[in-house]
Image: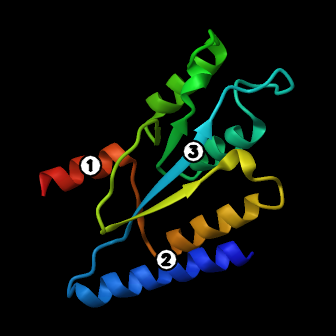
Amino acid sequence: MKRILILVTLATALFSRANAADPEPRKQVILLKLDDVVAGHLSFAGPVSTRWQRIADYLTANHIKGSFGIIGESLEKDNPAYFKWIKDIQQAGLIEFEKIAAKRDVLALQGHPDQWDDDRWPGFVEIVEFLKSKDVIFMTPSEYLRKTQSN
């Protein structure tokens, strides 16, 4: 709960500062950078852990864009179900697998969903709902890069 309060306070401060400096406020851009995707173990029913599947399903159902960082080692073994999961996620267009160096006009939220048990999951949802209430724009890193390069 303390971590949620810190993130909400930080986001509120960033919104206030951005709006005070800009006579015509723009929507805050949010990059969700969620790291350490690996193939699921034999004990999992799917190609990734239930926690990774939960975050992918949540973002998709809520039409929220984000970025997943893959642990390179997880790509070394032949795992067709895992590779299909990655391709399906990428092709859906809301979530991508890449990294970016961001400028100051963006707030990047980094997380490690495989560490979010059922007690921590509501904290993530609460942060996203707070950000949505502030009318932010969720972008993928490549979308943000295209936006900044075109300006």
Which residue does the numbered mark 2 point to in the structure image?
A: 11
Task: Give the residue at mark 1.
Answer: 145
Residue 51: quadrant of the picture: top right
Task: Kindly identify which numbered label has been placed on residue 10.
Answer: none
Separation of residues labelled 1 and 3 (CA atoms): 19 Å
- The residue depicted at 83 percent of the width and 20 percent of the height is 42
Q: Secondary structure at mark 3?
A: strand
Q: Which residue is at 51% across, 79% downward?
A: 10
**What is the spatial separation of the Cα atoms under label 1 and label 2, in whole angstroms?**
21 Å
SS at mark 1 in the image: helix
- Say few, some or many: other residues with alpha carbon within 10 Å of mark 3 (under 14 / 14 to 19 / 20 or more): some
Q: Nearer the viewer, mark 3 or mark 2?
A: 3
Quadrant of res 75: top right
Closer mark to the observer between disc 1 and disc 3? 3
Callout 2, which amino acid?
Ala
Q: Which amino acid does the dot numbered 1 rest on?
A: Leu
Examine the rendered structure and indicate whether residue 126 appears above or below residue 20: above
Q: Is 140 displayed left or right of 127 in the figure?
A: left
Foreground residue among 37 and 60: 37
Residue 84: percent from the left, percent from the top? Answer: 57, 18
Q: How far apart in space, not on screen, are marks 3 and 2 (Cα)?
A: 20 Å
> Residue drawn at (65%, 42%), measured in percent from left and top?
57
Circle nearer the N terminus (3, 2): 2
Residue assigned mark 3? 35
Count residues near mark 2 (Cα–Cα under 10 Å), then give few for <14, some for 14-19, many for 20+. Answer: many
Nearer the N terminus, badge 1 or badge 3?
3
**Quadrant, the N terminus:** bottom right
Q: Position of residue 28 (x, y in %)?
A: 37, 70
Q: Residue furthest right?
A: 43
